[in-house]
């Protein structure tokens, strides 16, 4: 369904009358351009400016020197589909209703996403890369069908369905860049250059959003950058491997994150190959960032263009023996977040913000930069407020959830700058509901679970109360559909295991057996 048809059907006249007031009151020449860049699966520590001297990310590092780096940025759901819907709408997953095995984003909710709002407010908009979720009134969450992606919501479209592809030629909307830029990461940099020229000619302020495929699996980096890490041997993180996972909950070790992605732990050779390719993919994104900043300079737009760089989730890279993302531990849930506003005074350049931030903050921040008041349904804070008064937000809390995958790994957590509390809700004859408490202000590698240490009983109770507060907010605001109401039962710390059983969808072994059966049946066809 085309977005224009949806707008006509739902007729949100009051909402758009509100926006038109801003269009009349704010001149186009006063509004900044906005560039939003999203990598895929980039954990924060895979970035030089976040303290990693084994990686080469000069453009990200320079962006941090010129702007503001948020040291503790969390993705409230650490999986691409849900996180991307949250990024665009500023709402927690349980309000968007959008994730694998749950459902697509309803068109009415997409109408309140930052790209649609900015376009209605007079911005020239463009999108390139992996869109990552479907927008439809149906129940099919699969975005592989291009018809389920609202390409008509943007003035210029360079995106694609599904995971997209590292080979430029296999992405229809950017295939014409393939000869010069065979790898999609640099091709998106070239697309950005052309978009910036077109946007300048439009005479409007612009918002350009690019969602890179990199560094998502399969790890197929651009050969153009083979020289960067040639001969490099990487040191593993201090919490690498099975020996550093004994203190973690049995639930966390029951999914594919612990039992698959074996290349991270098969051998020293497979680890070095994986981490090299992963870092090389990120270097490609860094190069594309440099291409974009150069284009802005050449077009005379760098002085009025805000750049926001982040990722949709982190990546475990072998920490605690985990591969993949999804889980609420630091490596999987945290990503870099850098904001550069060239209009800010020199004393605010190179700031490092310790207060926690989340992907729910991005949409309200983008709207605020455009001079539009964030919508009341948005859960996030404006980063401008955190930059202006960081101490005010030093005790802020965020909810982290996993509502996808096998039953055991579905959980809810609450995190502050210094503490993290995780409630693993699943129970059977192998395991009981488990609490984890980490003093992440002093223990970033999450070596010590303090939940059973009597010394920390007071802090445990504080975090339990904070969890219950966030749980009650979730229950009050969660979508009544797409299989979300069950989390009122599952994430309640007082629910008995017997009362959870009707809401369970399958353990890891059960779901793996079903997947294997389906694969076997397909081979027979």
Image (cartoon, helix red, strand yellow):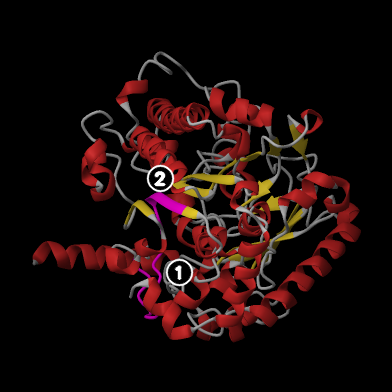
Give the main secondary structure of the magenta stretch: loop
Q: Is residue 126 magenta?
A: yes
423 or 441: which is nearer to us?
Answer: 441
x, y (%) of residue 315?
52, 44
User: Which quarter of the figure has residue 272?
Assistant: top left
As drawn, 459 above or below 168: below
322 or 194: which is nearer to us?
Answer: 194
x, y (%) of residue 354?
78, 41
Magenta span covers which residues?
125-142
Residue at disc 1, secondary structure: loop
Q: Is residue 292 visible?
A: yes
498 or 39: which is nearer to us?
Answer: 39
* Residue where numbered disc 1 is placed: 507
Residue drawn at x 40%, y 35% as measured from the top left:
193
Mark 1 is surrounded, within 10 Å at the Cα level, by few (under 14), some (14 to 19) or many (20 or more) other residues, namely some
Q: Is residue 451 magenta?
A: no
């Amino acid at each position: 369904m085309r977005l224009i048809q949806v707008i006509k059907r739902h007729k949100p006249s009051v909402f758009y009358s509100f926006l038109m007031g801003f269009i009349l009151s704010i001149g186009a020449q006063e509004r900044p351009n906005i560039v939003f860049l999203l990598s895929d699966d980039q954990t924060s520590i895979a970035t030089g400016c976040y303290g990693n001297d084994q990686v080469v990310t000069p453009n990200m590092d320079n962006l941090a020197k010129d702007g503001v780096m948020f040291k503790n940025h969390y993705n409230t759901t650490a999986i691409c589909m849900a996180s991307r819907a949250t990024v665009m709408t500023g709402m927690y997953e349980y309000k968007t209703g959008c994730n694998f095995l749950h459902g697509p984003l309803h068109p009415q909710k997409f109408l309140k996403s930052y790209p649609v709002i900015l376009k209605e407010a007079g911005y020239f908009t463009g999108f390139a890369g992996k869109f990552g979720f479907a927008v439809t009134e149906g129940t099919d969450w699969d975005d592989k069908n291009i018809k389920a992606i609202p390409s008509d919501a943007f003035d210029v479209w360079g995106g694609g369905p599904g995971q997209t592809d590292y080979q430029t030629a296999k992405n229809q909307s950017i295939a014409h860049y393939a000869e010069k830029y065979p790898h999609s990461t640099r091709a998106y940099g070239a697309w950005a250059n052309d978009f910036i020229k077109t946007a300048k000619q439009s005479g409007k302020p612009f918002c350009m959003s690019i969602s890179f495929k990199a560094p998502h699996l399969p790890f197929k980096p651009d050969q153009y950058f083979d020289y960067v890490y040639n001969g490099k041997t990487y040191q593993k993180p201090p919490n690498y491997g099975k020996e550093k996972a004994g203190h973690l909950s049995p639930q966390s070790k029951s999914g594919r994150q612990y039992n698959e992605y074996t290349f991270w732990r098969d051998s020293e050779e497979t680890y070095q190959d994986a981490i090299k390719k992963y870092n090389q993919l990120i270097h490609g994104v860094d190069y594309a960032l440099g291409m974009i900043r150069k284009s802005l300079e050449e077009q005379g737009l760098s002085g009025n263009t805000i750049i926001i760089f982040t990722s949709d989730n982190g990546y475990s890279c072998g920490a605690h023996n985990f591969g993949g993302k999804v889980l609420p531990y630091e490596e999987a849930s945290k990503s870099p977040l850098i904001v550069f506003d060239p209009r800010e005074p020199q004393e605010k350049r190179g700031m490092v913000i310790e207060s926690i931030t989340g992907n729910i903050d991005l949409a309200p921040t983008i709207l605020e930069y455009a001079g539009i008041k964030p919508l009341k349904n948005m859960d996030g804070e404006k980063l401008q407020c955190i930059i202006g008064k960081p101490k005010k937000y030093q005790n802020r809390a965020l909810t982290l959830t996993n509502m996808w995958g096998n039953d055991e790994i579905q959980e809810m957590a609450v995190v502050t700058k210094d503490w993290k509390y995780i409630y693993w809700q699943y129970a059977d004859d192998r395991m009981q509901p488990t609490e984890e408490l980490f003093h992440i202000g002093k223990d970033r590698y999450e070596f010590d679970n303090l939940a059973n240490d009597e010394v920390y009983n007071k802090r445990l109770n504080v975090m339990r109360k904070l969890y219950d507060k966030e749980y009650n907010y979730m229950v009050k605001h969660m979508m009544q559909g797409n299989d979300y109401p069950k989390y009122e039962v599952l994430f309640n710390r007082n629910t008995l295991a017997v009362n959870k059983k009707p809401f369970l969808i399958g353990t890891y072994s059960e779901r793996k057996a079903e997947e294997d059966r389906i694969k076997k049946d397909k081979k027979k066809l």
